[in-house]
Each structure stands twice: as C-alpha cells, then as structure tokens.
Image (spheres, grey):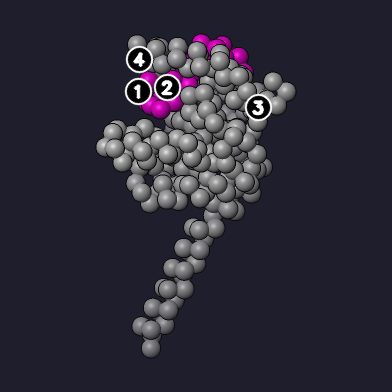
Amino acid sequence: MRGRWRGRSAWWWARRVVLALVLAPFVLTAVYWIVPPVSTLMVGRFLTLQPVTRDWVSLDDISPALVRSVIVSEDARYCTHHGIDTVEMSKVLDAYAKGRETRGASTITMQVVKNLFLWPGRDVARKALEMPLALWLDLAMSKRRVLEIYLNIAEWGPDGQFGIEAGSRAAFGRPAKDLTRRQAALMTAVLPNPIDRNPARPSRYVSTRANEIAADAAQSGGLLDCIYPDG
C-alpha cells in the first residue's frame, strides 16, 4: 500500500512539474512586458559564478543605425511576418530536399524565444517548441518590445557582456545611443559569434561583413515601419 501511495505521489508531482514547464513561457511573457527579462544563458552564467554584465536600455536609447543594421542582417522581414518567416523556411526546406547546405531561418522572435525559454543547441525538439512559442510571442507582444528584449539579452562579448549597451561600452567605450553607422554594422557583424569576433579589432571577414550590412541598411527603405512608423 505504501509503495502504491508513493507511486501516485511521484506521478502527481511529475504531472505538476510538466504543467509548470508548459505554462512557464506564457506566464513569463506577461511578466516580461514589465520586468527586464534575463536569458537562460545569463542564468546559467549566474549559477556557475561567471561574470554577467547587462545594462538594460529602452529602444529609444539605442542608435537607429544599430536597429536598422540588426534588422537587415538578422531578419529582414521582421515587420511583416508573425514570428516565423515562411519565405526563409521554404528556402531552407527546398535546399535540404536538394541536398544543399542550408542556412538558418530563425527570426528575431524565434531567437528571443530560444534565449528566454529554451536551451541552446540545434536539436529537433527545441525547434519544434520554438516555432509555436514564436507565434505566441508575436501575438502577445508588440514588435518594438520583442526587438527591445532581443537587443538587451543577446550575447555581445566574450566576457559575459549581454545586450547592446554592455557590448557597445566594452567595444567602443560609448553608449548604444551614440554608435555610428560603421560601429553599428560592426556590432551586428559579430552577433553570430561574439566570443571569437571583436568589433573593436575586426578581422577581414568581420570588416567585409560589416560593409555588406551597412550597404543593405542604407537601402532598407520601409523595413522598419513597425519600429519607426514615422520614418
């Protein structure tokens, strides 16, 4: 009898743990409308006593040049999709079907979901969770808020710098609102690998990539209508 009771108790707790994990992203979404979020990577560094530097800044205190550079580089259809870029997803699936090397199709919204609620890696299980959560986040939050969160939780340096403010001060000794177009392009170019890439001392690849980003940003037209509706 006691063994049966223990089994039922364990099952009771297991169900509640699973329910809590399922509900956590939805509860946290409401909280993160008000409270500056922290990423799972930041939490991991806190728990392992590694340094974390993050100075939260509002979107209005970030250089528009940086915002534009990030949009054109990371998610050019950010203002028009609903969390998932079906155009890029179709390209990836087509390339995969033809046996060609595929590029990532993660949107900024999907990256925010991964950083806030999920674990690092490229496994199928995480992707399966990432997409519906991205649709939810796009529905529950404004485009401006999602982008503001992204720019404040992205890893932006090798020594625990998170967010554009900490990254900008570490690289160029200036706040994010004062970044020049060139500096904004360099900061964006290192985003995929902020551990090994240095915007202050860019490699040839980073410098070339920054040039491409700057050129795309200069011709981006109305890509940022959901961020700066008045231009």
Residue labelled with disc 2: 190
Q: Which one is in front, 181 or 9?
A: 181
Q: Residue 147 appears in which quarter of the rendering? A: top right
Segment colored magenta: 176-197
Q: Residue furthest right?
A: 230
Q: Is residue 227 visible?
A: yes
Mark 3 or mark 4: which is in front? Answer: 3
First along the sequence among labels 2 and 3: 2
Point out the image quarter for the N terminus: bottom left
Q: Residue 178 appears in which quarter of the rendering? A: top right
Residue depicted at x 42% and y 82%: 5
Q: Marks 2 and 1, how far apart in space?
A: 8 Å
Percent of width and height locating residue 95: 33, 36
Which mark is on residue 196?
1
Q: Which one is in front, 71 or 160?
A: 71
Residue depicted at x 50% and y 38%: 85
Instruction: Assign a secondary structure to mark 2.
Output: loop
Which mark is on residue 205?
4
First along the sequence among labels 1 and 3: 1
Q: Which one is in front, 115 or 228?
A: 228
